[in-house]
């Protein structure tokens, strides 16, 4: 689970343990566990190397076409 305060409530832990589940928390910030972070990084890099007049929509379309 991620780390919002609602997930830290004891009732959540009790419900999971009652169902024979194991509760695991993700690190505070874990870009390697979040696939979209890799795409955001690639899009930022593409934007940095694109001509100045290239729209963000064009950059995204070109990235998605690959």
Image: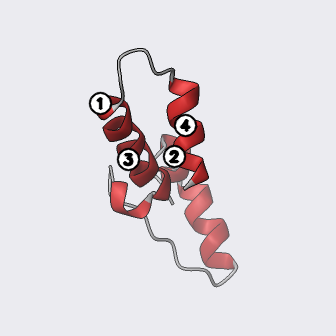
Question: Mark 4 touching mark 1, by CB under 8 A?
Answer: no
| Distance (Cα) linking label 4 and label 1 | 13 Å
- Decide which of tag 1 and tag 2 comes sooner along the chain: 1
Question: Mark 3 touching mark 2, by CB under 8 A?
Answer: yes
| Distance (Cα) linking label 2 and label 4 | 5 Å
- Which residue is tagged 3? 42
- Which residue is tagged 4? 60
- Decide which of tag 1 and tag 3 comes sooner along the chain: 3
Q: Which residue sits furthest bottom? A: 20
- Decide which of tag 4 and tag 1 comes sooner along the chain: 1
- Which residue is tagged 1? 48
Question: Mark 3 touching mark 4, by CB under 8 A?
Answer: no
Q: Looking at the rendered structure, which numbered label has been put on residue 63? A: 2
| Distance (Cα) linking label 1 and label 3 | 10 Å
| Distance (Cα) linking label 3 and label 4 | 10 Å
Question: Mark 1 touching mark 3, by CB under 8 A?
Answer: no
């Amino acid at each position: 689970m991620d780390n919002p305060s609602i997930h830290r409530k004891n009732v959540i832990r009790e419900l999971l343990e009652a169902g024979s589940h194991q509760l695991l928390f993700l690190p505070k910030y874990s870009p390697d566990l979040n696939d979209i972070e890799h795409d955001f990084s690639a899009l930022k890099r593409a934007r940095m190397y694109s001509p100045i007049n290239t729209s963000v929509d064009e950059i995204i379309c070109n990235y998605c076409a690959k």
